[in-house]
């Protein structure tokens, strides 16, 4: 009797945030191209699946609760037990390695120097995690090397294939996403207000995006009230936000997952960088070659459809959580980044778009 199960089946384990999941989509695209008839599923933490909506390269999404009872966890592990031929983990965590062990006989993933010997043995193929010198996209694609699969570095944004809000039909506009998840990646609110006011003086309508987080919605609402920009914070899913961005004239945002999503749509994307190392985490340009590193460590720079506008200082990028080394810290490199640095790029960009 012939089995209906594909000869190869893959589980991608990405138990981090939306930006990490998005930058793992080239792994999914590469597997799909190499094995078009295979089963490809992705396991993410509950609440993170929206970044994969409309992704044509995957068959299913498994949402794992961050915390649950032992009984529910045992049921989850039982449901995954050896369902796949291969499990690939682009994140270096004990949790991801254990889920890989449960899910498949062939397990490929990353380890750190401090990873325990027990956790290392959960994988059949290990790679040392590089947090400094290699961008996340080609870094993740290293998992394909033992499988002999050619890499495809296309980052695939979500899509809801929906219509735009009524006021935006047939209108050129810019999307501004002012609020990152962590304070140490923030640009001052006054700077966002000034930037938007300057764009409006240039007859560029501005649309503000944001999540349903109450604090984020309050910040976006204040900016909207002071600028009359269109406030869509909390009203769109991730996929709907991607569809909105796709049709924009350009996008401006901090170092956050939405900015990675904007870059993947192919539109001009301006991002503000401070403590974060752009070599590792700069938004991946939509047409970037796998063989080339798009970003250097220091300085404002431009590749493809992406501009990185970096704060200055001898410590930049410090690769730390702001000046005080915690998520709620401020970063002086971003505090001191002038609005004029962003406007200069926009002026050059809009001049070439005419």
Image (cartoon, rainbow, N blue to C red):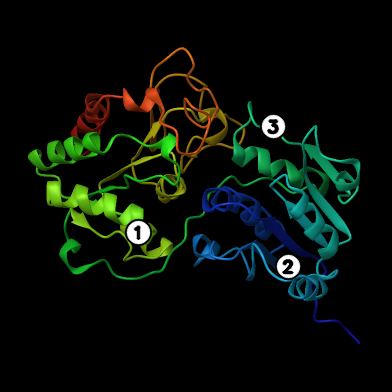
Which residue is the extreme one toward the top? 314
- Distance between the Cα atoms at labels 3 and 1? 35 Å
Asked if residue 61 is positioned above or below residue 287 in the image, the reply reads: below
**What x and y, as percent, mark residue 65?**
64, 67
Local secondary structure at mark 3 = loop
Instruction: Please give the label number shown on residue 176.
Output: none
Q: Quadrant of residue 60?
A: bottom right
Residue of label 2: 38
Residue of label 1: 214
- Distance between the Cα atoms at labels 2 and 1? 41 Å
Are discs 3 and 1 less than 8 Å apart at CB? Answer: no
Figure quadrant of the N terminus: bottom right
Instruction: Please give the label number shown on residue 130.
Output: 3
Are discs 3 and 2 less than 8 Å apart at CB? Answer: no
> Mark 3 or mark 2: which is in front?
3
**What x and y, as percent, mark residue 224?**
18, 51
Local secondary structure at mark 1 = helix
Residue 208 seen by the camera: no
Q: Is residue 280 left or right of residue 196?
A: right
Local secondary structure at mark 2 = loop
**What x and y, as percent, mark residue 194?**
17, 35
- Residue at 38% x, 69% y is 161
């Amino acid at each position: 009797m012939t089995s209906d199960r594909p000869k190869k089946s893959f589980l991608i384990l990405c138990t981090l945030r939306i930006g990490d999941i998005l930058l793992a989509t080239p792994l999914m695209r590469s597997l799909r191209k190499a094995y078009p008839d295979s089963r490809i599923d992705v396991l993410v933490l509950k609440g993170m699946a929206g970044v994969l909506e409309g992704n044509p390269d995957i068959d299913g999404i498994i949402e794992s609760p961050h915390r649950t009872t032992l009984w529910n966890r045992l049921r989850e592990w039982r449901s995954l037990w050896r369902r796949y031929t291969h499990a690939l983990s682009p994140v270096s965590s004990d949790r991801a390695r254990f889920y890989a062990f449960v899910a498949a006989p062939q397990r490929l993933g990353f380890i750190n120097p401090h990873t325990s010997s027990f956790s290392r043995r959960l994988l059949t193929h290990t790679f040392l995690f590089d947090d400094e010198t290699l961008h996340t996209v080609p870094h993740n694609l290293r998992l394909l090397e033992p499988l002999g699969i050619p890499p495809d570095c296309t980052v695939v944004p979500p899509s809801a294939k929906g219509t735009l809000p009524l006021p935006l039909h047939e209108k050129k506009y810019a999307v501004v996403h002012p609020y990152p998840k962590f304070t140490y990646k923030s640009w001052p609110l006054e700077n966002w207000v000034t930037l938007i006011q300057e764009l409006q003086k240039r007859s560029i309508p501005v649309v503000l995006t944001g999540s349903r987080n109450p604090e984020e919605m309050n910040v976006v609402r204040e900016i909207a009230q002071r600028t009359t920009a269109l406030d869509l914070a909390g009203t769109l899913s991730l996929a709907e936000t991607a569809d909105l961005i796709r049709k924009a004239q350009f996008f401006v945002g901090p170092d956050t997952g939405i900015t990675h999503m904007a870059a993947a749509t192919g539109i001009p994307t301006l991002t503000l960088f401070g403590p974060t190392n752009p070599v590792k985490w700069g938004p991946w340009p939509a047409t970037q070659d796998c063989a080339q590193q798009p970003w250097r460590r220091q300085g404002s720079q431009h590749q493809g459809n992406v501009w990185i506008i970096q704060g200055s200082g001898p410590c930049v990028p410090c690769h730390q959580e702001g000046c005080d080394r915690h998520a709620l810290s401020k970063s002086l490199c971003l505090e001191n980044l002038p609005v004029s640095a962003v406007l200069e790029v926009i002026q050059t960009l809009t001049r070439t778009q005419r």
